[in-house]
Amino acid sequence: MQKNKTVMLKNDIINIKGAVHRDIASWEYYMKKIGVRSLCLMFFCFTLIGTFGCSKSPENDITTTIITTTTTTTTSTTTTTRPGRNYFPNNDGYSWHYNSSDGTSFIYTFEGTAVINGSLSVQNYKSTQIDSSGNPLSTSEAYYRINDAGVYFYGMPSYTTTEGWPLLLFPLEVGHSWTFYSFGSYRIVATIIKQETITVPAGPFNCFNVELVSYNGTVESSATEIWFGEGAGIVKETINNTTNDTMVLDSKNF
């Protein structure tokens, strides 16, 4: 059965490569087949990298734009001019435990750094999936770079991207919208839709609610909501599909 699922997944990706113009359906569909969730878009990003290549939103270009709009109004440090970084804490060794509505759970940990593309230093973000009995099912790694301009995804060990894909852009403000990924007529748009306090098993958190919507042309094909909690990082994620799969923060080690 697992072999059949693997063949089906490979065929799906081949079909995407041969017909980018068609609706590629929801990316959660591929997450389900692989057997993992899309928290922080780790595996979804991997599929996009391997299929379409790099984004047109380089980290340096975005950083330059933000600096241009802020230097005219302040001369203080970058930490104070770009509020929001405390909504994605990234100290080495920080770890999060999440429970999923499908009965599985995940542990995410920042573990050391790596050098990619010759000279770029990135953080290693490790994921371990655990079944309902506490047995590890799989482990994966992703590369992130977090600075005072935002949170950028740089791929995985098997395939890195030369340009950072912006998961978050600072400062965090309701109504702020940006392109996370784009290729031809396909794009993923992130929007901060509200700020609210929510309670999960790990406790109550002041959150910015970010919605990521994928489009094929002007047609919306899927959406995911992520709640970034102050001093905690991701505390909740909901995939808006037929089952409304949800993942919530159970505990963290800091």
Image (cartoon, helix red, strand yellow):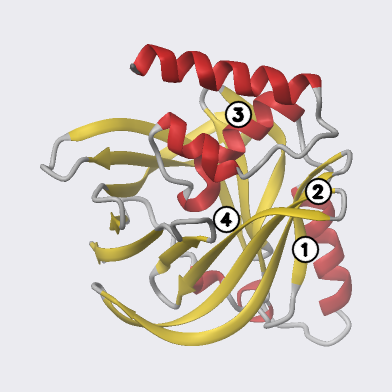
User: Mark 3: which secondary structure?
Assistant: strand
Q: Amino acid at mark 4?
A: Ile
Residue nearest the viewer, comparing 251 with 211: 211
Give the Cα separation between the discs numbered 1 and 2: 10 Å
3D distance between C-alphas at marks 2 and 4: 15 Å
Q: Which mark is residue 178?
A: 1
Mark 3–mark 2 distance (CA, rounded to whole Å): 18 Å
Mark 4–mark 1 distance (CA, rounded to whole Å): 17 Å
* Of callouts 1 and 2, the N-terminal one: 2
The residue that label 2 is drawn on is 57
Q: Amino acid at mark 2?
A: Ser
Is tag 1's residue or tag 3's residue first in the polypeptide sequence?
Answer: 3
Query: According to the image, label 3 marks what residue?
Result: 116
Disc 3 marks a residue whose amino acid type is Ile
User: Along the line of sight, which residue is nearer the eye, 250 or 233?
Assistant: 250
Query: Which element carries disc 2, helix, strand or loop?
Result: loop
Spot occupied by residue 163 in the image (x, y as percentages of width and height): 74, 39
**Label at residue 55:** none
Q: Position of residue 253 (x, y in %)?
A: 23, 62
Q: Earlier in the sequence, mark 4 or mark 3?
A: 3
Q: Which amino acid is tagged 1? A: Trp
Q: Are marks 1 and 3 in contact (CB under 8 Å)?
A: no
Q: Nearer the viewer, mark 3 or mark 2?
A: 2
Q: Residue at horizontal 71%, vertical 37%?
A: 24
Q: Nearer the viewer, mark 1 or mark 3?
A: 1
The answer to whether the residues at label 4 and label 3 have Cβ atoms under 8 Å apart is no
* Sooner in the amino-acid sequence: mark 4 or mark 1: 4
Closer to the N terminus: mark 2 or mark 4? 2
